[in-house]
Amino acid sequence: MSVPVVGMSEHDFKAALKKTRRAIIPVGSLEQHGSHLPVYTDSLIAEYVARSVADRVGAFVLPVISYGVSFEHKPMFNVSLRNSTLSTLICDVCISLTENRIRKIIILNGHHGNIGVFQYIAQELHGRLPEAARVHTIHYWHMMKAEFDHAGEVETSLVLAIAPELVRMDRAAPNSKKLSKSKAAYSSITNVPGSFPKITGNGVWGDPRKATAAKGEKWIEEITAGLAKTISELA
C-alpha cells in the first residue's frame, strides 16, 4: 500500500494513519549525469524506488527532496546544499512528521554525496522525537549486487526502465579518463569540491553504452525486494 502525500487531503491522511504510521522520504540531487541523462537522475530514481517499496511495506511517500550535496561536480552543473543545511531540512521534516503521528521514518537516499549528512541524522534528532519514533537511512544502491556507478551502465539502465524518454543514448559515452586508483583513494578524493570532473574527464563513471531497460527492470526488482526486506528488519 503506497500512500503518496502529493494530492492527499487532511481527511485522506487521517484515514491512512489507521493503516500505517510509516513514511518514506526519498532524497536525491540536482547534478550533471553526463550528456545523456537528466540532472534530475538521482531524484527520479529515489522517488520511483520509494513508491515501489511503499507498495510492498505500506507507507506514506513524501515528495522527493531534490537538492543534495554535490559540490564534487563543480564546475559542471550542480545545485548544492551545505551539509548543515540538508541536515537541518531533513531533521525538521522528521520532527514535523512525528508531530503528525508518524512513528517510523525511512530516509531513502539516492545520491552518494549525501551519505555524510545522513550518517548523523539519528544523533541530531536524539531527544527531539517521541520515544516511540525511529528514523533510519538506507542508500538504495546497497541493495544491489552490481557495482554502482555515476551515469554509467547501472544508472542509465535504471532511467531507461523508469523514463526512457529522458535518455539520449546517442550521446552516451564512458568516462574519458582512465580510472586506475583504488576505491579507497577515489572515495577520499571525491569528497573534494570539483574533484569529479577532474577524475572522470567528462562527468561519467562507467560505461552507459552497456545499459538496457531490461537490466534496469531487473535491478529495480532487486533493489525493491532488498529494501522491503531491510525495512521489515528495522521494524
Image (tube, rainbow, N blue to C red):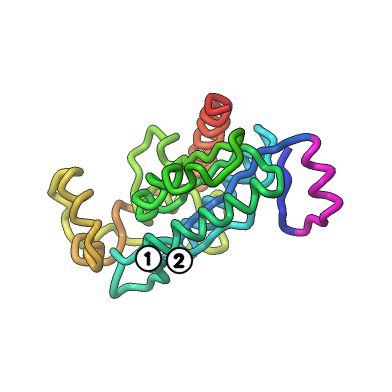
Residue 225 on the magenta span: no
Residue drawn at point x = 68 percent, y = 40 percent = 59
Residue drawn at point x = 37 percent, y = 73 percent = 77
User: Could you say where residue 144 lies in the image, as x and y percent from the top left?
Assistant: 42, 35
Q: Is residue 195 left or right of residue 35?
A: left
Q: Is residue 54 left or right of residue 41?
A: right
Q: In which image quadrant can residue 101 be found? A: top right
Q: In this view of the protein, which residue sits in the foreground, 134 or 66? A: 134
The boundaries of the magenta stretch are 7-18
Q: Secondary structure at mark 2?
A: loop
Q: Where the N terminus falls, by quadrant? A: top right
Q: Main secondary structure of the magenta part?
A: helix
Q: In which image quadrant can residue 20 be found? A: top right
Q: Which residue type carries mark 1? A: Arg
Q: CA distance from mark 2 to mark 1?
A: 13 Å
Q: Nearer the viewer, mark 2 or mark 1?
A: 1
To which residue does mark 1 refer?
82
User: Could you say where residue 18 lies in the image, as x and y percent from the top left?
Assistant: 80, 36
Residue count near mark 1 (Cα–Cα under 10 Å), binned few <14, some 14–19, many ≥20: few
Q: In this view of the protein, which residue sits in the foreground, 119 or 169? A: 119
Q: Secondary structure at mark 1?
A: loop
User: Could you say where residue 190 lies in the image, as x and y percent from the top left?
Assistant: 23, 57
Q: Which residue type carries mark 2? A: Leu
Is 144 drawn above or below residue 75 in the view shown?
above
Residue count near mark 2 (Cα–Cα under 10 Å), binned few <14, some 14–19, many ≥20: many
Return the mark for residue 30: 2
User: Could you say where residue 40 lies in the image, as x and y percent from the top left?
Assistant: 49, 64
Q: Where the C terminus falls, by quadrant? A: top right
Disc nearer the start of the sequence (2/1): 2
Is 165 drawn above or below residue 222 in the view shown?
below
Specify whether residue 185 is in view.
yes
Q: Is residue 116 left or right of residue 192?
A: right
